[in-house]
Image: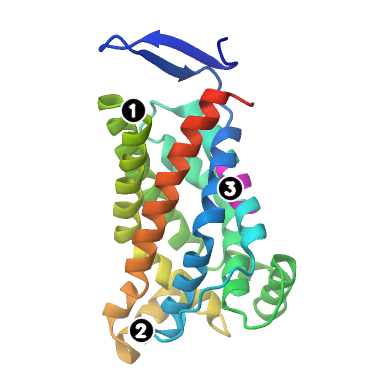
Amino acid sequence: MKARNIIILPSNNGNKKYIRNNNNGINEGLSRTLSQVITYPFEAKKIRLQVYGNNNGKISFRGIKQSSITSGIVYSIYYTVYNNLKGNPLASTIASVATSFIKIPISNCMRVLQLSDSKTNIIECGKKIILTKGFSGLYIGYNLNIVEDIIEHNIRNNIYDIGKELINEPFLNMIIGCIGGSIAAGITTPFDTMKAKLINEKSKKNIFAIIQNISKKDGLHTLYYGCKIRTLSNATRFGMYYIFLEIINMISIF
């Protein structure tokens, strides 16, 4: 039986080639949720390394459900936009900007949750940000986030799309996803570190003040704190993400 929302075409090597016949991002969102569950503890450890240094990276599962669900929602929105614009060289950039208004407040609230030593939730963390920094505090590091997302998504999407055109085998696609995820993570780690430090400041500071403070106090090399765990985490996350996506596309639940 042919799966719903799938077109079957012959490929150059005689095997069947499966192509989705819809542009919604629900499959991508579900895949992101599942892959986030697997790698979340390492993400939580990474942010504590970035803010507190090498000796304070604790493994924590606190916030895993909230992070996984919200990541899935953001990815559903992102890929709904991206899939409808695919082929346009600005597709990834437009999708990053379109999702930024919901993604950035969620990300900032999750960073506060991950850095907290007490039991809390994403809503309470949002209230804490608004109380101490005002509503605009939810969007701290907005420009930084946009730049990072554009770079990261473009690298990862391009590596995966090119690799899939050349190979198009599920297991090898997972390897391509690992490579794309790790390269994108390594390049954008300084942006990620600055975002973590910005949200952890008690008062509002701009990115230039953060860089100056890092340079004087710790040295610019600390912008790469957590790089190894972030690179490995993203390699695992996006390897799993793409294999989940292949499976879900074939099952074609949605």
The image quadrant of residue 98 is top right
* Element on which disc 2 rests: helix
- The residue that mark 2 highlights is 214
Quarter assignment of residue 49: bottom left
Q: Secondary structure at mark 1?
A: loop
Q: Label 1 is placed on what type of residue?
A: Glu
Residue occupying the point 32% across, 46% down: 180
- Asked if residue 61 lies in the magenta stretch, the reply is no
- Of the numbered discs 2 and 3, the one sitting upstream in the chain is 3
The residue tagged 3 is 33
Residue lying at 63% horizontally and 45% vertically, measured from the top left: 73
Which amino acid does the dot numbered 3 rest on? Thr
Q: Earlier in the sequence, mark 1 or mark 3?
A: 3
Mark 1 — residue?
A: 169
Q: Residue at x 39, y 15 (%)?
A: 17
Does the segment drawn in magenta span residue 72?
Answer: yes
Closest to the observer: 218 or 164? Answer: 164
Q: Position of residue 9 (x, y in %)?
A: 40, 9
Number of marks? 3
Disc 3 packing (10 Å; few <14; some 14–19; many ≥20): many
Q: Quadrant of the C terminus?
A: top right
Q: Nearer the viewer, mark 1 or mark 3?
A: 1
Q: Secondary structure at mark 3?
A: helix
